[in-house]
Image (cartoon, rainbow, N blue to C red):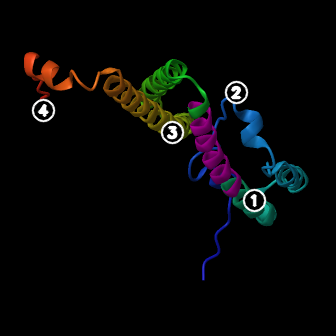
């Protein structure tokens, strides 16, 4: 049976760690194991032994911790964006969604530019940008949901207010004199 020797580049498998927006960072990072002790041990092992084959345990432990941390952080970022969107007025939520959309556009453009870079540097830039782009798109989902939900609530409230404002005795007479509106959806 062949034994696999892990190297530092094996830590770059999968998406990179998420970038957490500063306005929600305190809520997202609270109580999360950041793996800093394991990373310190890995660097110490590499400093002492000078090569990666002697630090296999440290690499495996850090990789497992980092994967678990990143999953939890992505989940918390999505939940925090959802809560933030619920607590914001509709206009502010739309503005935040617009900012995130412009960030997505910028990352997509940078990813296209990075596709022309060859070698290890190009790979690292594309890997990092792809991870950031994926995370930013995930942040956009809860905000879109909240905006749609707030629009629906506003529409329902407007419909309720419209039926309450209409006097009961005049509803049939008004309906007979006004033209009936038809809505077409293509």
Looking at marks 4 and 2 on the same chain, the residue that comes earlier in the sequence is marked by: 2
Residue furthest to the front in view is 169
**Vertical placement of residue 54 versus 105, above or below:** below
Q: Nearer the viewer, residue 160 or 184?
A: 160
Q: Which residue is mark 1?
A: 59
Residue at 61%, 37% in the rendered image: 83
Looking at marks 4 and 1 on the same chain, the residue that comes earlier in the sequence is marked by: 1
> Is residue 102 shown in magenta?
no
Quarter assignment of residue 108: top left
Question: What is the magenta range?
Answer: 68-85
Mark 2 residue element: loop
- C-alpha gap between disc 3 and disc 1: 34 Å
**Vertical placement of residue 61 versus 32, above or below:** below
Q: Quadrant of the N terminus?
A: bottom right
Residue 186: give its label: 4
- The percent coordinates of residue 37 (x first, y second) are 87, 52
């Amino acid at each position: 049976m062949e034994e696999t020797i892990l190297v530092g580049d094996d830590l770059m498998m999968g998406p990179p760690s998420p970038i957490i927006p500063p306005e929600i960072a305190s809520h997202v990072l609270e109580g999360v194991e950041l793996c800093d002790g394991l990373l310190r041990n890995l660097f110490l092992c590499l400093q002492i032994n000078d090569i990666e084959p002697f630090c296999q345990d440290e690499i495996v432990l850090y990789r497992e911790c980092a994967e678990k941390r990143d999953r939890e952080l992505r989940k918390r970022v999505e939940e925090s964006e959802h809560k933030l969107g619920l607590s914001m007025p509709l206009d502010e939520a739309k503005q935040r969604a617009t900012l995130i959309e412009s960030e997505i556009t910028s990352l997509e453009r940078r990813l296209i530019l990075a596709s022309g870079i060859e070698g290890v540097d190009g790979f690292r830039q594309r890997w990092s940008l792809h991870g950031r782009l994926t995370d930013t798109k995930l942040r956009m989902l809860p905000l879109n949901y909240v905006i749609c939900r707030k629009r629906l609530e506003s529409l329902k409230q407007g419909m309720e207010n419209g039926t309450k404002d209409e006097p009961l005795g005049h509803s049939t007479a008004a309906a007979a004199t006004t033209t009936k509106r038809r809505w077409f959806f293509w």
